[in-house]
Image: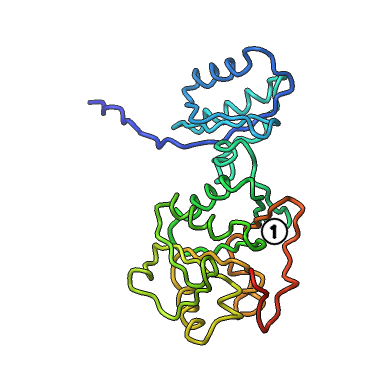
Amino acid sequence: MPRPAEVRLMEKKQWYMEYKIHKNRPGLLGDLASLLGMLEVNIITINGVEDRTRGLLLQTDDDEKIELLGRMLAKVENISLITLRPPRLTDILAIRHGRYIERDSSDGKTFRFTRDELGLLVDFLGELFKRDGNQTIGLRGMPRVGKTESIIAGSVCANKRWTFVSSTLLRQTVRSQLSEEETNPNNVFIIDGIVSTIRSNEKHYSLLKEIMAMPSTKVIEHPDIFVRESDFDYDLFDCIIELRNTPDEEITYENFTTAGLDDGF
């Protein structure tokens, strides 16, 4: 007696597709949407990215359909397929905000933002903070550019509590102990790299080492001073974010000394 055919349910996966338009003729997007419809590939999100390309977030339960889509689009003269891959965080945010996050090509883990991109930065931080486990993020920037405020807003987006280990947001804060609730590994720990190394004491530094060993998210403002004045090195950081008032602003520490800091930092 023949056995009934087995039904195999494949997991739906998302894909990021980006293409450049050479000739934006009427109906081009409609033709593409029709092609995706015939392949039963769903369009989750679509947006123009920096007026240069168009990005789509797709979903399907059949990888072969994506391979077929790529081969078919390679034959279309009006567009050039740039990317067709599982989405990265930067891909998702590019579609969501219509612009790319600037990334340092030399190390691959430095991301640059300006103050007029705070919404994008907060969204980026929020997505990072949603990740479980240990991660350390460095945040460079001059005074009053919005570093700490962005971290707090990102924590809210990720529905995470935040804990100040050291800070100068309202007044100088140097913690030597934390409550049980504050040491929850699910919290986002905010550390001012200057205060924790130059302006701290032995009790604070002992607490800092305990927190750095926890499997949790740590955000360190002024990471360069933190590395210079501590036993940690740059390998500690999973990524480093730079926030500037303008794209050409230089992030400088000329006013910093090992004895102390000028007011305002």
Q: Is residue 9 above or below residue 106?
A: above
Q: As rendered, which of 34 and 177 lies closer to the eye?
A: 177
Q: Is residue 15 above or below residue 123?
A: above
* Percent of width and height locating residue 232: 60, 76
Q: Is residue 212 above or below residue 71?
A: below
Residue at 58% over, 59% down: 147
Query: Which amino acid does the dot numbered 1 rest on?
Result: Asp
Q: Is residue 154 above or below residue 165?
A: above
Residue at 53% over, 85% down: 201
Q: Residue furthest left?
A: 1
Label 1: few (<14), some (14–19) or many (≥20) C-alpha neighbours in 10 Å: few
Q: As rendered, which of 177 and 65 lies closer to the eye?
A: 177
Q: Residue furthest bottom?
A: 202
Q: How is the image coloured?
A: rainbow
Residue at 58% over, 80% down: 199
Q: Residue furthest top?
A: 26
Residue at 53% over, 36% down: 15
Numbered disc 1: secondary structure: loop
Q: As rendered, which of 149 and 129 lies closer to the eye?
A: 149
* Percent of width and height locating residue 253: 72, 70
* Percent of width and height locating residue 121: 57, 49
Task: Pick the quarter of the image with the C terminus.
Answer: bottom right
Left or right for 25, reference 31: right
Task: Pick the quarter of the image with the N terminus.
Answer: top left
Left or right for 262, reference 67: right
Question: Dot 1 corresponds to which residue?
Answer: 107
Q: As rendered, which of 64 and 103 lies closer to the eye?
A: 103
